[in-house]
Amino acid sequence: MLKVSIYRYNPEIDSEPHMKDYQVDTGGKDLMVLDVLSLIKEQDPTLSYRRSCREGVCGSDGMNINGKNGLACVTAISDVVKGNKPLVVRPLPGLPVIRDLVVDLTLFYQQYEKIKPYLINDTPAPAIERLQSPEERDKLDGLYECILCACCSTACPSFWWNPDKFVGPSGLLQAYRFLIDSRDTATSERLADLNDPFSLFRCRGIMNCVDVCPKGLNPTKAIGHIRKMLLQQGV
Amino acid sequence: MTNIRTVTYDAVIVGGGGAGMRAALQLAQSGQKTALISKVFPTRSHTVSAQGGITCAIASDDPNDDWRWHMYDTVKGSDYIGDQDAIEYMCNVGPEAVYELDHMGMPFSRTEEGRIYQRPFGGQSKNFGEGGQAARTCAAADRTGHALLHTLYQQNLMHNTVFFNEWYAVELVKNQDNAICGVIACSIETGEFVFFKSKATVMATGGSGRIYSSTTNALINTGDGVGMALRAGFPVQDIEMWQFHPTGIAGAGVLVTEGCRGEGGYLVNKDGERFMERYAPNAKDLAGRDVVARSMMMEILDGRGCGPDGDHVYLKLDHLGADVLHKRLPGICELSITFAQADPVKEPVPVVPTCHYMMGGIPTNINGQALSVDADGNDKVIDGLFAVGEVACVSVHGANRLGGNSLLDLVVFGRAAGIYIEKALKDGIEHRDVSASDMESAETRLNRWEVSKSGEDIPTLRKDLQMTMQNHFGVFRKGDLMQEGVAKLADIRERIANGHLTDKSSAYNTARIEALELDNLLEVAEATAIAAEARTESRGAHSRYDYPDRDDENWLVHSIYDPTTKKLGKRDVNFSPKQVDTFQPKIRTY
C-alpha cells in the first residue's frame, strides 16, 4: 500500500484548501504518479486534475510532486518516494488554484503570447520551403521541444514575484527559439520588446527552471544568449 | 437548458488539434467571426503525439518524386476502398500545404541542401510500386506532430482566432429541417452550458482509440464527434476499420514511430529472426501497417513471441548507433527508457500491435461537408455540418492508413474545409432557425447524469466496454466472437443508462466530463461492433478468420452504419480521379 497525500480544494465546498490522505494498492508495481492519481479517482471521483497524452509530450499534468515540479505521467513513484514516505502531490505553485490540482494558467499563457511566439518574415515566401542548413536548424534543438507544461515558470521565484511582468523561463526559451531561427526577420523588434527592467532582466540565474524541466531543456542558457544579443545590439 | 446563453459566430470549430486549428487559421486569416472550442488547451491535443512525420511528395529526398506515386501507394494501402478523388486531391495539394507549414515556422529537420528532411515509411514506393522503396515522409526529428501542432497554435495566436479552451462540446443542435445550427458546449472551469450558434459547425474532434483497453491514443480520444453525429441520427462510414499500429510499447501502449523502421530498425522474434522477410519479402518491415501487425500477431500466436509470456516481439534499433538514434529518434529513446526501461542504443524495445487510428468516421466530401445517404442511396449534404481530420472519413485511408498520411490529411482537409466555408460565408449563408425543442436532446442527455442517484460507477463501465472491444474486435476477428461482443455491448448500454455520476459540482468537475465521454465511447464501440460483424470479408485492417479473403464482388464499397436502424448499408467508393487514370484493384502484396 502506498500512502498518498493530495492537495484538495473545491471552491464550492471548501472554505480553504487541505491535504487529504489516501491508501493506494499499486500491486507492487512502480507506477507513474498519473496512474496513482487515476487509481485514486476510482475511489474518489471528486479529485480533479488535467491529463491527456500520458506520455510526457502534451504538458497537461504538470504538478508539484514531493516538493518538485514535474509531469505526473513520466514520474515514477520510485523517482520521488523513498522508503515508507508518502507520495505528496500539490498543484503547481504560485498560480491561483481552480480546483484540487488544476491551476489557472492564464498568467503563464499571457507571458507566452507576449513574446510573439510565431515566425515573422515579411519577405515573399518562395514556391518551396525556405531553405535552412542543418547547422542553422540545429540551433532550434533544445528550444522548440517545449511543451508549455509550466513546470519551469512556476518553480521560478522571480516569476512568483512578478508573474505579470517577468516573461519567465518558458516564454523566454520560446523568445530565443524565434530570435535564433534563420527564417525569422524580426530580431531587433523582438529584442526591443524584451529590453525593460522586468521582461528578461528579472531572471536572477537561480536555475530552478533547468532543474525541473521534464524535457531536459535549459531556459537559463537561452536567457543568457538573449542577454548577449541585447548587449551586442547596444554596442 | 432552454434558457441557456447563446453566443453567435459565423463558424464554430470543435476541436483544437491539427485539423481544427488548420481550419480555424484559414477562417481567421479571412476575417470570419470564428470560434474554436477545445476540451483541452490546444497544444494538449493528440496531434502532439504524432512522431514520424507527414508524408508528401515534395521531392526533397528524390528530385523526381511524383505525387501520383504517393497517390498510388495510398490507394493500394487503403485496400482500394479509399476514394480516389479525395486521395488525388490530398496528394496533389499536399506539397503546397507542407510548404505553408514551413513558411509558418515549423521546425522541420533538414538535408544538406537545406530542404526538408524526408525518411522512408511503410507502404511507400517509387514509380507506382515498380521503383523500390521511397523516402517521402517529411519529419521534424520524431516530434513532427508536436512541431506541427505548436506551429498551428502559434499562427492562430498571430491571427487572433477566438479560443474557448477547456470547453467541452456536448451535443449538436439540429433543427426540424435536419440542418445543424450549432453546438451546445460546457465550460469545464465553471460548469456553464452555452449554445454556440453557427452558420458552419466543424467537427474536428479527432479519434476514439479509448474504446480499446490498449491504445496509443491520448486519454482524451473518446470519439466525441462521432458520438454527437450518431446521436443526431447521422451515419458513419467504414467504422469497422481500426488500425492497430505494429509498434506500441508492450504493456504501456505508448507509440514508437514507424520511422524507427524507416531509419533501418527491424522486428525480431524470440529466435532473433527478422520474421518480416517471410511475410513481406520485398518491403519487409516497411510493408503496410495492417500487414506488419498481423505478421507480429502470427509470430506471437505461433509461440515465437518474446518475454516470459511470449506476448510481444522486439524492435531492434541498436545497430543504428547512438548518433543516428539521438539525432533522428530522440523522443523514442526517451519514451523507451521511461516506459520500457530499455535504452534503444543498447537493447531492443518490446513492442506489440496496439489500437492506433480510426479510419472510419463521419463521411464527407472534399470540402469537408458532412454527408448522409438518402433512401435511394444518394449522397446528401448535411446543412451546416462539416468534419475534418480523424473524425472524418473523406475517405483517404479506406481500410488501412499509411503512416504519415494522417498529418497530411489534417492540414490538407482542415485547409480545404476552411477555404470552402470562407467562400460559402462570403456568398452569404444565414443562421438557421432554432426552436426550443431542438435543444431537447442535449438536455435529455445531461439531465440523465444529473439526476442519477445510484448505479454503477463510470470507471467500471468504461473498463468493461474497453475490455469487450479489446477481446472481441482486435487484430483478428471472428463471427461468433463478434456476435458475443455485440450482445455484451447491448448489455453495457443498459448499464450505462443506469450509471451513476456521484459528483454533481460545477467547478472543473472532470467526473462529469468522463460521464459524458463514456456516452460517446459507447456510440463508437457499438457502431464499430455492428459494422465489423456485418462486413463479411477481410480487407485492410479488418481481418476475419471466418472470411479470410477480400471480396471485391460484394464489398468493394464503403460501409455506412445508420444509428437509427443500427444496420449496415453500403456506399460507392469513388473511382474517378480528375487528372490521372483510375487505379484498378489488384491483389495487395508487399
Image: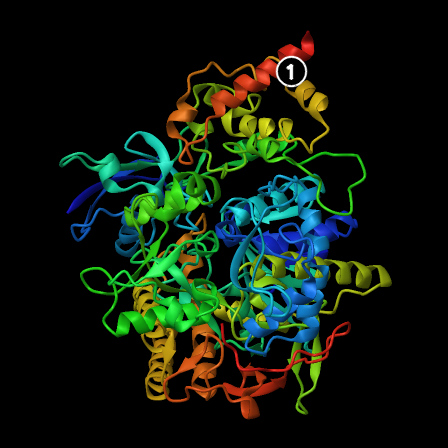
Residue linked to disc 1 = A195
Amino acid carrying label 1: it is Asn
- Density class for disc 1 (Cα within 10 Å; few <14, some 14-19, many ≥20) is few
Looking at this view, is B411 or B187 the one in front? Answer: B411
Is residue B41 visible to the viewer in this orientation of the structure? Answer: no
**For residue A139, above or below residue B433:** above
Task: Give coordinates of residue B192: x percent, y percent.
Answer: 54, 53
**For residue A167, above or below residue A82:** above
Residue at 44 percent across and 56 percent down: it is B261
Is residue B248 visible to the viewer in this orientation of the structure? Answer: yes
**For residue B246, above or below residue B106:** below
**For residue A206, above or below residue B440:** above
Looking at this view, is B136 or B403 the one in front? Answer: B136
B32 horizontally vs A140: left or right = right
Q: Quadrant of the N terminus of chain B?
A: bottom right
The chain ID associated with circle 1 is A
Asked which quadrant contains residue B437, the reply is: bottom right
